[in-house]
Amino acid sequence: MNLSMEVHDKDDVLELALIGEIDAYTAPSLKETILPLTEQANKTVVVDLEQVNYMDSTGLGVFIGALKSANEHQSELRLTSLQDRVRRLFDITGLDSIITIDSTVRGGD
Amino acid sequence: MESFDFIELKVPAKADYIGVVRLTVSGIANRMGFSYEDMEDLKVAISEAMSNATEHAYKQGEEGEVAVGFGVYPDRLEVMIADHGASFDVEEVKKGLGPYQNTPSIVELREGGFGLFLIEALMDKVEIKNDYGVIVLMTKYLRENEVDMNDDQISTTQ
């Protein structure tokens, strides 16, 4: 029930790989990690959610905050490799039309 | 009176224990024969209600407990989540709930407020009582056909 995070810096692309669960307990540390990435100007922040097997609205809140921050700093936010269940929350809430989500969708394990 | 099994759990009103309640509902739903999809819906809905309860307690500076009750019926699971903090205005909270429409500008996006919306989207029935503290009562019905169809997926998730 934890979340671990790895940041890979590849020139203009900052990749954030997440492993675990995003809920009200882990969301604060995710926010602390992702915001400094989106505050760097002219970067693309790619969040790899392949190994996130649980997420709820606290995660949605963090990604909305990150999108706002990216927008303010002329950088870009992309979410990639979402499991079906996680992807579904973006669909239900209509956020899929606001946040850039890569079309490759993985099945839930 | 309809007979049912009742399971009760009390946890400190801290985000640390939301995952514990989520694992518990997963175990109960699995035992009842819910499909994988429905178990995942239950996990999100219960976590949302727990997040609201713990966040509310935190804002009030309270070190309270959240009581969670599971009513296990032959055809449904009822989950009751009660914080014991002061009441908040449910109508006020429900304002502005719902999916995004007409793509608002990014600056106007709200970062919270999806909790109750998701609970209502994922459960079959939701009641909120706001008398002494806040009680959220949620119901999810078992769908027999779905259970059979997804039989191979059920035992793997807890």
Image (cartoon, coloured by chain):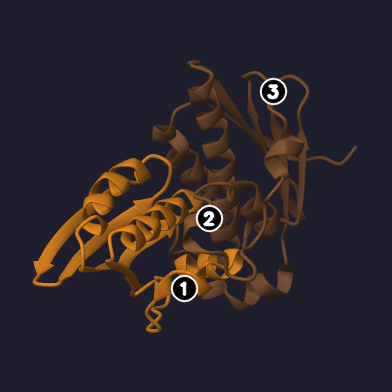
Of circles 2 and 1, the one toward us is 2
Q: Nearer the viewer, residue B19 or B3?
A: B19
Gap between marks 3 and 1, in whole Å? Answer: 36 Å
Q: Residue at x 39, y 33 (%)?
A: B16
Neighbours of disc 1 within 10 Å: few (<14), some (14-19), many (20+): some
Q: Residue at x 22, y 62 (%)?
A: A16
* Residue highlighted by disc 3: B87
* Residue highlighted by disc 2: B108
Q: Where is residue B63 in the image (x, y as percent from the top left)?
A: 48, 16
| Amino acid type, mark 3 | Ser
Q: Mark 3 lies on which chain?
A: B
Q: In this view, does B92 lie above or below B96?
A: above
User: Chain in brown?
Assistant: B
Q: Residue A74 is drawn in which quadrant?
A: bottom left
Q: In this view, does A63 lie to the left or right of A20?
A: right
Which type of secondary structure does the marked residue at label 1 adopt? helix
Which type of secondary structure does the marked residue at label 3 adopt? loop
Count the marks: 3
| Amino acid type, mark 1 | Asp
Q: Position of residue A40 (x, y in %)?
A: 19, 58
* Residue highlighted by disc 1: A84
User: Chain in orange?
Assistant: A
- Does the CB distance between marks 2 and 3 fall below 8 Å? no
Q: Residue at x 71, y 31 (%)?
A: B135
